[in-house]
Amino acid sequence: MKRTSWSAGLHVTADGTGVVAHAGSAALRLLSDRTGLTAELSKAMARRAFIPGHDRGRVLTDVAVMLADGGEAIADIDVLRHQSQVLGPVASPATVWRALDETTAARLKKIQSARARVRRNVWAQLGLRGGIPSSKAAGADLGSTVVLDVDATVVVAHSEKEKAAPTFKRTFGFHPLGVWCDNTSEFLAARLRPGNAGSNTAADHIEVLTEAISQIPAACRKRILVRSDGAGASHQLLDWLDRQGRVRGRRVEYSVGFAITEKIREAIAQIPARVWAPALDADGGIRDGGDIAELTGLLDLTGWPEGMRLIVRRERPHPGAQLSLFEEADGWRYQAFATNTATGQLAFLEARHRAHARVEDRIRHAKDTGLGRFPSRDFAINQAWLMLAQIAADLTAWARMLAFTGDAEVLAACEPKALRYRFLHVPARLVHGARRRWLRIPETWPWAPAIVAVFANIAAIPKPA
């Protein structure tokens, strides 16, 4: 049989009707409506004596859905416009540009407040389904503790954009700082910064963490853990976190990387060999070649917050690793972190801190959902775009927790690319009958039962009061 026989008699035309591409994206739009997000965004964008042709809350929601669906440019909104028979009127690219331009700093604050109200409703629904997912470390969960991971990343700009600047990685672009909730994978807060913004700027960290904590429903703020790499090890930030932990009814702990200074090296040299304890891996087992010890009593921590502890980990370096002169002397590689957690085994505290590395996956997913490319030369429009990237990440996270359950659980572990390939980009046929519209997923689609279950689960979400 000829290898090309499958294409015999195949002809392509552009006159198809009743066919819907990317049909799964309608589920995210429906989720936005059912959780009350669309209505809240409409209130946040409302202007006195101005009635737009396209409701601005709906426009912002559609852009967030477009980003979750894999769109990278404002012109990609035309993919949703193609689905007008299902979604109704969708704004044009020009209208999207106007909506982003109308999203001023004052409206961004209103949008943040709107997101917090919607999140309160979503977390209430999760509470009825067993509670907020627990963050995990060393094979154990952290219970009711809400874990906030803060980190910055570089976004390259390939053209001259307002406030784009050279970065520490010798590229050109922006250096946004964000906060993710490790329990739910939600993208809580972010700040768009020039490329030359400092990694350990305490004011920026305090600003995004303040916004992130305000996103957490008040009932869930009783136990909070803030994790960061070495960029968070500043007096100003740790003092601020210490004050947050003194708020009545709230306990805020931190776990931040700490630079290995000369004084720390001297303290490490004083640790007896018998003091080093084995480290734990991600599953709670003994980490081969890794040891833990505490340095708190060997250092003068005057000026740092009361109760701060310093813990160091050593491990044999992997081949090709670059070591300092101090590390080359004994063949160990050292990393330190500071925490105010008073109880718990050192090995568990270190494994809990190392779990901060999961934020790299959150950043990677966010860059695949709008964060990786800013569309405008105007800084204000790019700030609005960053906010919509956060909303897109939230919609995906809410879908995992509220909709990818039961028969749809097979989709819960999908990363953005796989989720689009299996669910969001599924084709369907729109059929009218019995005074209803039927969106028919192909019977032979491998994940068809799961997709039907997703729509049913979303439709079952009670609307906010």
Image (cartoon, helix red, strand yellow):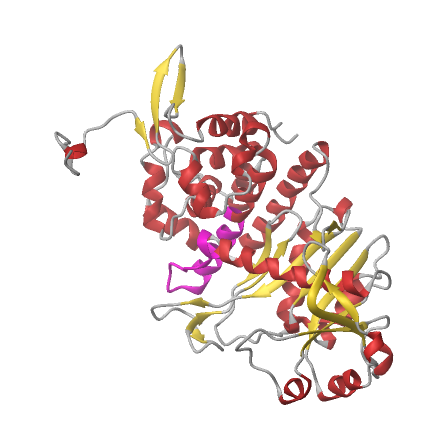
**Residue 289 visible in image:** yes
The foreground one among 290 and 79 is 290
Where is residue 174? Give x, y as percent: 46, 69
Q: Quadrant of residue 254?
A: bottom right
Left or right placement of residue 279 versus residue 364 in this view = right
Left or right placement of residue 147 versus residue 318 in this view = right
The foreground one among 48 and 19 is 19
Magenta span: predominant SS is helix
Compared with 453, 324 (above or below) is below
| Residue reaching furthest to the top | 434
Left or right placement of residue 449 versus residue 403 in this view = left
Where the N terminus falls, by quadrant?
top left
Residue lying at 82% horizontally and 72% vertically, measured from the top left: 309
370 is within the stretch colored magenta? yes
Where is residue 300? Give x, y as percent: 84, 84
Query: Which segment did they paint magenta?
Result: 367-392
